[in-house]
Image: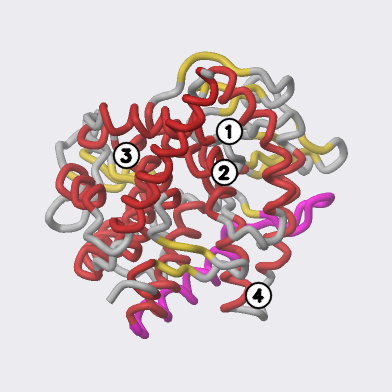
Amino acid sequence: MKSLIKVFCVAVALFAFNAKAQIEQCQPWQAWQVFKSHFISPDGRVIDLGSKQSITTSEGQSYALFFAVIANDKAMFDLVLDWTENHLSEGDLSTRLPAWQWGINEKNVGAILDSNPAADSDLWIAYSLSQAAILWDDRRYSILAAVLAQRIIREETAYISGLGLSLLPAPAGFEFKDEQYKLNPSYSPLFIYQQLKKLYPHSPWEQLHESSAKLILDTAKQGVSPDWVMYDTNNGFYYDKKTSDVGSYNAIRVYLWASMMANDAPYKKELLAQFNPFLKTINDRGYVPLNTFSKSGKSEKRGPLGFNAALLPLLTIQDDDSLAMTIQQKLMVDKSFTQTRYYDSVLNLFGTSTLNKRFAITADGTLQPKWSTECS
């Protein structure tokens, strides 16, 4: 009897949540307004609050561009884009990939702290620009997206025997002697490759899509993804003292990107099947672990609230409704992190907007915000 009551309560709660989500889809995105007010400066800089040097990363800028498109917030999109171009690309995104890190230096002056670009951020910027160009009919965005896409191919990829053309995490520092490489599965949202393949059919984006799918699947044999992995052309994927098999703040995005893919997108079914053991672990524990270990599939410690938000869409896809509702209730009770913790806030925006269907991404990677299709 108690189990029936629990099932009934979950069903009622889910109905209420879905009804609320459908109403919210076409209303101003309150969570985005909170993020803007706490993490984005008036001139368009996304700040990691509390970081030692008031850090801004190209990652933060790239995610803000995507969220601005979802929110139909062209004014903020332009502010973030202009700040990125002026401060991370020396004034011209068409001639320089954005530096990874900017902050307050030892002279107490804002400056680039690490000039090496981050390939995942560059992908997100190119993708957001390409979709903004279509949705807002802006030719400048389209040109910038195309140029960035070309630079990514030219500067941030390498042909790796056994993998094919692959995305390097940055132009420098991840390719070693004896054909060894350090790679990051979370740097490759497969739907971005699909869209860039569609937009630029004469560039090798299909090859990057296939090698990235292999990277993600082959490094998650036990159901969980690592933050980083080494690759040797003779022996395949491996770990060493400097690069362990732990999955945490990077790997959490692998599951998130998978949940954002269309159900008929290439590799979606394979990814869901691959990550099912991790979802079972989450269901057994009642929360998302902080650390996982890709060689054994084991996990430890409790992850922050942002981790839980990031896994909500995947849990819902796999019909873990009871746990999903429990996590949602916790997120509604404790929202303080959305005003103080940059990365958790980002994961929360991605996870909840995916869950609430503020946007859809088609099998070919086309972004379809609700405001562009159903809201008048």
Q: In this view, does 25 lie above or below 130?
A: above
Position of residue 84 in the picture relative to residue 153 (left or right): left
Q: In the rendering, at what x and y percent does residue 194 appear?
A: 62, 67
Mark number for residue 345? Answer: 3
User: Is there a contact, CB below 8 Å, between mark 3 and mark 1?
Assistant: no
Mark toward the start of the polypeptide (3 vs 1): 1
Q: Residue at x 43, y 31 (%)?
A: 9
**Residue that label 1 marks:** 227
Residue 115 makes an appearance in the image: no
Give the number of the mark in front: 4 or 1. Answer: 1
- Res 79 → quadrant: bottom left
Give the number of the mark in front: 2 or 4. Answer: 2
Mark toward the start of the polypeptide (2 vs 1): 2
Mark number for residue 186? Answer: 2
Q: Which residue is drawn at 37% across and 53% down?
A: 63
**Residue that label 4 marks:** 203
Q: In the rendering, at what x and y percent does residue 343 appear?
A: 35, 37
Q: Which amino acid does label 1 sit on?
A: Asp
Residue 219 highlighted magenta (yes or no): no
Q: In the rendering, at what x and y percent does residue 211 appear?
A: 73, 54
Mark toward the start of the polypeptide (4 vs 1): 4
What segment is highlighted magenta in the picture?
137-166
Q: How far apart are marks 2 and 4 (CA)?
A: 22 Å
Give the number of the mark in front: 3 or 1. Answer: 3
Q: Distance between the residues labelled 2 and 1?
A: 7 Å
Q: Which amino acid does label 4 sit on?
A: Ser
Q: Residues within 10 Å of mark 1 (few under 14, many from 20)?
A: many
| Element on which disc 1 rests | loop
Q: Distance between the residues labelled 4 and 3?
A: 34 Å
User: Which residue in the rendered view is the most extreme toward the front?
Assistant: 1
Q: In the rendering, at what x and y percent does residue 279 appear?
A: 61, 31
| Element on which disc 2 rests | helix
